[in-house]
Image (tube, helix red, strand yellow):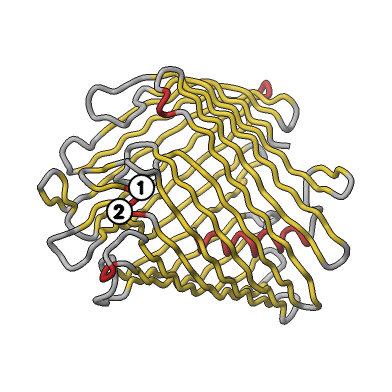
């Protein structure tokens, strides 16, 4: 998450230098609004292996990006999103999710100094071993400097502090989620960007992250880790667009660590291409380490964790009569680093998650699409009682100017 945030700041800054900062202009404000509305049926609201509960759902998601130039040197950037999640019968699953960020930028010669804050409240599923929707709150503050040694060479230094807390009273196999996962996160990163062509930028990045679990015993309170990555950022005008990063995530083997040691592959890939004028192909790959709710009392490490890998692809095709067909598929995998203790038994837990979605939409102008969608989800695991599958289907409307 922190690595992605760092890259977004850099890529958005470089992109906006060459184009207007928003879709619409209203006085000094540049605005880019988006609205997504889905309404349909979820056949397995609680991700249950047996006794699945079905309900009618509706989700309304307006989003807004805002840019305000303040003279020649200053600029304010903000984002805001709202998700209204409605379940007709299962009232406990209803929620209003909020998220917002703001950043002020100051240009001084070759340097841009930036700083900002953000926060939000969401009720979703946040971990492979949490099948309940629960509320999570977070707030963050960040700052840094982007220095352009030349037009094509930039160095970006950034620091970030974030606090994450979870809803009280939610228990997963005897462990309260808030006691396990409430934490303060501090990170620092250095990123180097070298333009190797007008449409391709070489990226090198190093990041240190320190997590402090707020309710853990003193001896197992902190988890320090490192990310090292390199890759490319491709501009929107390139044949292949997006970001490709490959690197390593490292949790050192130290007695004071709250999680088990790990050293392995890290991926952050999001690429798009248009092999024909009527088609677009996407490819994604994300691999990193996530924290688990469960503790491991029989071993030295207090907190378990798992390697989360998600690989996916998508195809969007323009059809006759103004129709748009969109299909996506993803394969996820969660490999737990330590035995997962469930109902008194330890398992070498391995989860596999497959998600497939298809949508047929009708365009009304360039911005509005309305149609139908269906999604299939299935998780297989070697822990008894935790396998599930479900289907969601309904209507979809999206307004993306």
Residue occupying the point 40% across, 70% down: 248
Q: Which numbered disc flags the more N-terminal residue, 2 or 1?
A: 1
The numbered mark at residue 127 is 1
Q: Which residue is mark 2?
A: 292
Q: Judge whether 138 appears above or below 204 on screen.
A: above
Q: Which mark is residue 30?
A: none
- Residue drawn at x 32%, y 67% is 221
Instruction: In the rendered view, tell whether residue 75 sits above or below residue 280.
Output: below
Q: Residues within 10 Å of mark 2 (few under 14, many from 20)?
A: many
Q: What residue do we see at 32% from left, 21% from top?
A: 53
The quarter of the displayed image where residue 198 is located: bottom right
The picture places residue 293, in percent across and down from the top left corner, at 29, 51
Mark 2 residue element: strand
In the rendered image, which quarter is residue 367 located in? top right
Q: Nearer the viewer, residue 100 or 61?
A: 100
27 left or right of 326 in image:
right
Q: Is residue 267 left or right of residue 83?
A: left
């Amino acid at each position: 998450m922190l690595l992605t945030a760092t890259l977004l700041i850099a890529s958005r800054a470089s992109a906006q230098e060459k184009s207007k900062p928003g879709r619409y202009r209203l006085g000094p404000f540049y605005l880019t609004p988006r609205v997504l509305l889905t309404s349909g049926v979820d056949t397995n609201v609680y991700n249950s292996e047996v006794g699945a509960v079905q309900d009618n759902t509706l989700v309304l998601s307006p989003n807004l990006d805002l840019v305000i130039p303040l003279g020649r040197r200053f600029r304010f950037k903000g984002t805001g999103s709202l998700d209204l999640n409605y379940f007709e019968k299962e009232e406990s699953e209803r929620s209003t999710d909020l998220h917002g960020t703001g950043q002020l930028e100051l240009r001084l010669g070759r340097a841009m100094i930036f700083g900002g804050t953000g926060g939000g409240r969401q009720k979703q599923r946040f971990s492979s071993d949490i099948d309940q929707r629960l509320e999570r709150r977070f707030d963050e503050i960040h700052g840094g400097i982007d220095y352009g040694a030349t037009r094509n060479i930039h160095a970006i230094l950034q620091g970030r502090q974030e606090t994450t807390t979870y809803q009280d009273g939610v228990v997963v196999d005897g462990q309260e989620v808030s006691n396990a996962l409430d934490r303060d996160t501090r990170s620092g990163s250095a990123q180097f960007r070298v333009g190797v062509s007008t449409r391709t930028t070489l990226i090198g990045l190093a990041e240190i992250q320190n997590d402090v679990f707020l309710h853990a015993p003193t001896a197992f309170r902190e988890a320090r880790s490192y990310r090292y990555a390199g890759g490319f950022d491709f501009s929107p005008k390139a044949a292949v667009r997006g970001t490709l990063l490959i690197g390593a995530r490292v949790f050192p083997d130290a007695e004071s660590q709250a999680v088990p040691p790990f050293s392995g592959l890290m991926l952050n890939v999001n690429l798009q291409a248009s092999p024909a004028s009527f088609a677009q192909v996407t490819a994604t790959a994300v691999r990193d380490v996530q924290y688990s709710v469960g503790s491991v009392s029989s071993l030295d490490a207090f907190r378990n964790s798992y390697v989360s890998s998600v690989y996916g692809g998508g195809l969007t095709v323009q059809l006759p009569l103004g129709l748009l067909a969109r299909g996506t598929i993803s394969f996820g995998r969660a490999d737990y680093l330590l035995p997962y203790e469930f109902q008194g038994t330890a398992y070498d837990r391995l989860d596999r998650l497959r998600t497939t979605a298809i949508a047929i939409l009708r365009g009304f102008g360039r911005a509005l699409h309305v149609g139908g969608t269906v999604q299939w989800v299935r998780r297989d695991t070697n822990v008894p009682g935790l396998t599930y599958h479900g289907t969601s289907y309904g209507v979809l409307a999206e307004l993306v100017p």
